[in-house]
Amino acid sequence: MFWNRKIETMKPRTIKKLQEERLRKIVRYAYDNVPMYKKRFKECGLEADSIKNLEDLEKVPFTMKDDLRRHYPYGILAVPLSKIVRIHASSGTTGKPTVVTYTQHDLDTWSELMARIFTVSGTTRNDVVQNAYGYGLFTGGLGFHYGAERIGAAVVPTSTGNTKKQLMLMKDMKTSVLCCTPSYALYLGEAAVKEGYEPLKDFNLRIGLFGAEPWSEEMRRRIEDVLGLRAFDVYGMSELYGPGVSIECEVQQGMHIWGDEFLVETIDPKSGEVIENGKLGELVFTMLTREAMPLLRYRTRDLAVINEEECECGRCHPKIMRVSGRSDDMLIIGGVNVFPSQVEHVLMSIEGVGDHYQIIIDRDILDKLYVKVETSLESTKDKHYNEEKLRRRVEEELQSVLTVKAKVELLPPETIPRSVGKAKRVLDLRKS
């Protein structure tokens, strides 16, 4: 399904031609209207008109999250404050929040991108969309809300939390599309069974749009099994409008980035050098039509592989081959780099292991991976269940796949605290 067939089916040559035209305009626009960029260009000996094509983009200095914090709240505005109609902010827990601003043009663009997101997943005007992303300063709630309304779907704006009411409305309203974090989707499935629902019979769900945190194929399988829907991975971040940067199509082999609005690169996160597509690197985005807050070469810290091959769905927009984690989330265990998503991949592939886990960082255990994970409710009811045997297997699987020694503590079901937003997978005791 296509929302804008002409744009979504553009061929690579057409996409790149459009990107170059828009790149020249946005560089000139940012240079003329954002003092930070003019200063940066002059420090590098660059003129705006020297950026003529995609290859020239490497000359442009990076924009960092700290740049947004240093210029808090309005230092990167390219328009008068009187033209701003919406303000959001990041959910950061330290220091100043990252403020993002929107003109009416930006909101219209964002809604169009979200309309594509919904349509790619198969959502239509006949669907009932339950939006369990947070409303407010976080961009997720309103981003999904306006996108669903743009395609004409009915929206149930439940926001996060109040899980019992979420489940009641999901049944009564005949919700067919669920939007939330993947960890909350798992929790909803768990809570539904606990409350006496039979999700596959009582609910009308068919599509799930899940993002805002890394998640594995194994988590996708568990969500789909318990809720009876097809789960789609969605990518975005507040600085880049919010959700809507990319989504999986029906082929589900990577998330299409809308190349008419975002120019993506991958770089070596340490050196900053551009690396070729097809190799793991940090994602860097240039926004091509943003009016209020144009961002040039914004470093996301998200690590992924970019694929530019034409997709079976008919789209040639480049694809993110699943975000493996963030460079600043990486753990160093016994000299080995480990991402929480890798741990999840191993845990959820083992029968008897539950859906919820935590990685513990402790002063006294820095040479081993220390994981607390729940056992599944089904395993504890099995008369052949052997906790010690399962614990050893989990430790062996983690060491085999991640090449680090693991210390695993098995916990009873419903022991680890649940989250209605982004799950807290890593507990750093060194900060306590």
Image (cartoon, rainbow, N blue to C red):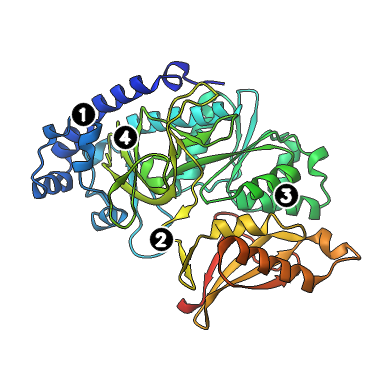
Are the two marked residues, 1 and 4, in contact with CB atoms closer than 8 angstroms?
Answer: no
Foreground mark, 2 or 4?
A: 2
Q: Which residue is identified by label 4?
A: 103
Q: State the residue at coordinates (27%, 49%).
A: 273
The label on residue 328 is 2
**Quarter of the image holding residue 354?**
bottom right
Give the amino acid at mark 3.
Gly
Foreground mark, 1 or 2?
A: 2
Separation of disc 1 and disc 2 at Cα?
Answer: 32 Å
**What is the crowding at mark 3: few (fewer than 14 residues within 10 Å), some, or many (at least 20)?**
many
Q: Secondary structure at mark 2?
A: loop
Q: Quadrant of the N terminus?
A: top right
Viewed as shown, does residue 13 lie left or right of 212?
left
Judging depth in this view, the residue of 295 and 79 nearest the camera is: 295
**What is the crowding at mark 2: few (fewer than 14 residues within 10 Å), some, or many (at least 20)?**
few
**Quarter of the image holding residue 237?**
top left
Foreground mark, 3 or 1?
A: 1
Q: Earlier in the sequence, mark 3 or mark 4?
A: 4
Q: Earlier in the sequence, mark 2 or mark 4?
A: 4
Q: Is residue 374 above or below residue 367?
A: above
Could you say where residue 67 lies in the image, as x and y percent from the top left? 25, 54
Give the amino acid at mark 4.
Thr
Could you say where residue 63 lies in the image, as x and y percent from the top left? 26, 49
Could you say where residue 319 lies in the image, as x and y percent from the top left? 46, 35
Q: Is residue 272 visible?
A: yes
Viewed as shown, does residue 235 lie left or right of 57?
right
Foreground mark, 2 or 3?
A: 2
Q: Earlier in the sequence, mark 3 or mark 1?
A: 1
Q: Secondary structure at mark 3?
A: helix
